[in-house]
Amino acid sequence: MSAPREAQLLIVDDNEDLAENLREIFEPRGFRVRFTPSAAEGLAWARSAGFDLAMVDVNLPDASGADLLPALRSASPLGEVVLITGHATLDSAVAAVRGGAFHYVVKPFKVDELVATAEAALRQGALRREREALSRKLAASERRYRDVVESSRVLVVGLDARGIVHLFNRRAAELTGLPAEEAIGRPALEALIQPEARDRVQKHVRQTLAGASSGEFEAPLTARDGRTVTVRWHVVVAGAEAAPDEEIAVYAVGTDVTDGRALERRAAEAEALAHMGTLAAGLAHEIRNPLNAALLQLHMLGRGLGKVTSDERDPLLARTRVVEGELRRLERLLSDFLELARPRPMAREPVALQELLDDVASFQEPAAAAAGVALVRCIDVAKAVGDRERLKQVFHNLLVNALEATPQGGTVTLTCRSVDAGACAEVVVADTGRGISATTRERVFEPFFTTKGAGTGLGLSIVRQIVERHGGAIDLESVDGRGTSVTVRLRSTTDPE
Ligand SMILES: Nc1ncnc2c1ncn2[C@@H]1O[C@H](COP(=O)(O)OP(=O)(O)OP(=O)(O)O)[C@@H](O)[C@H]1O
Ligand SMILES: [Mg+2]
């Protein structure tokens, strides 16, 4: 036989004649032979140069071959060890094989047998090396794939055919607040999709698996902080063959598109308003003239009636007041709408928020008392820069919404403080009212969206427009049935526009 490359053969035997014989047998067969009579030296060789095959005498002057075996194997893990033994020590050789030696040869040995054993040992070594290399490659590719999945900014979830989660990447865990260990083993629908959308999603996934639809859909997910986010899911089938129950059959890859959708909606709203604006501003102007004329006439009618001394006066007066109330409501609607569609220039002056908020809250105090709602103020000194009247309108609208949503016995809290080392003011209007459902939440800032019989649905649209024109930000959080909290941030300094 010839070795596939120059194989390293280490002979550890104190019998020099025998060692010489072995050299004569193996060197012509392409082995590079090293010989040493002692266990200690053999081990040193193994550690420095390694070996493919070691032939070790069971009885060495400084150790037994069986004792040397584990040290040799760990010095050169891919090498094989063959023990050489006389009849007297066959038992210990057999024990050594059980302990990890490849085989043993009994002295005196036949050359053919010895060569066959060496050949088999080398083959085994080569196979082992190949297996090690393959499993290293496999581990590396698995690591690469895991790194990609784990570091991805999209959600990656693997499900079996029953819809049970088997893979839940870091982003999925971050967004849902559910650690992978807890998500794995649970139904994916339960972990990732809000209850009202589950039937729809399940149907969609089935159709995708049957090849009947695109595999893309959007669904609401409850984020770790209780917010509802919209996730766009892409579902792909994992393999061509049907997977057994326990294996991943489908991958769902999701992207949080909440911000994108909100932006699209804002753009559409702005566009609609711009279109409406021109038309409506003209129309509103036309309505306002007769409206004012009617109000004036009504006023005069009231004065005229005051001079009449008949019994019919009081009911007539009451009626004119009703009509006046309605006309004023119409006027307010018109002003709100005009404000939204055709905003007028804004003042930019320092505004002491604590005073402004105290005014707004005091104005609402009687309404709160009548409704049996506690109106709590926690107002620190804070400053804003902008338009006093517009800002008043912002907090007035928010307080009215909060009071309207809160039942008797509830609380509305108005908080104001200076934040970011005085750079900003933060005002929070929080209520313990009925809250807003996930579907309504998406629409509250739309102009004309209202759930109230007598509402115009312009309140929050105006609030947002004014806050944004001040370079501020507004955030609305709500838990259905528990209450709503609206946070407005305004700049306290004039610097950047
Ligand atoms: N604090 C709140 N609690 C519960 N729902 C709210 C709250 N604030 C707003 N909403 C919801 O948002 C909708 C829109 O509010 P918005 O202020 O824009 O209009 P509105 O209050 O209906 O009418 P108006 O123009 O008279 O203010 C409301 O109809 C209500 O469903
Ligand atoms: Mg309102």
Image (cartoon, rainbow, N blue to C red):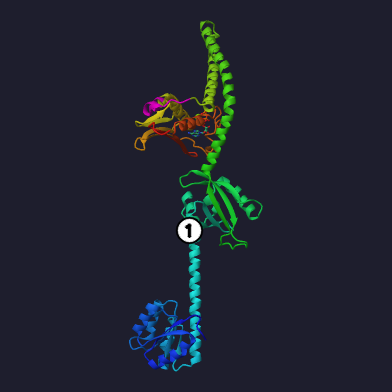
- Quadrant containing the C terminus is top left
The residue at the far right in this view is 212
Task: Say if residue 427 shows up in the picture.
Answer: no
User: At which x and y percent is residue 32?
Assistant: 44, 84
**How many labels sit on residues?**
1
Does 68 sit left or right of 115 as displayed? left
The residue at the far left in this view is 62
User: At which x and y percent is residue 185?
Assistant: 52, 58
| Closer to us: 359 or 311 | 359
Q: Amino acid at mark 1?
A: Asp
Q: Which residue is mark 1?
A: 147
| Closer to us: 202 or 71 | 71
In the depicted structure, whether residue 111 falls above or below residue 287: below
Q: In the image, which residues are magenta?
A: 345-359
In the depicted structure, whether residue 314 falls above or below residue 348: above
In the depicted structure, whether residue 293 falls above or below residue 433: above
Measuring 52% from the left and 43% from the top, which residue is drawn there? 258
Does 465 sit left or right of 60 as displayed? right
Measuring 54% from the left and 10% from the top, which residue is drawn there? 301
| Closer to us: 244 or 351 | 351
Task: Say if residue 328 shows up in the picture.
Answer: yes
Local crowd size for mark 1, using a 10 Å CA cut-off: few (<14), some (14–19), many (≥20): few
User: At which x and y percent is residue 307?
Assistant: 51, 5
Question: Is residue 201 highlighted in magenta?
Answer: no
| Closer to us: 246 or 425 | 425
User: At which x and y percent is residue 432?
Assistant: 45, 35
Dot 1 falls on a residue whose secondary structure is helix
Question: Is residue 355 highlighted in magenta?
Answer: yes
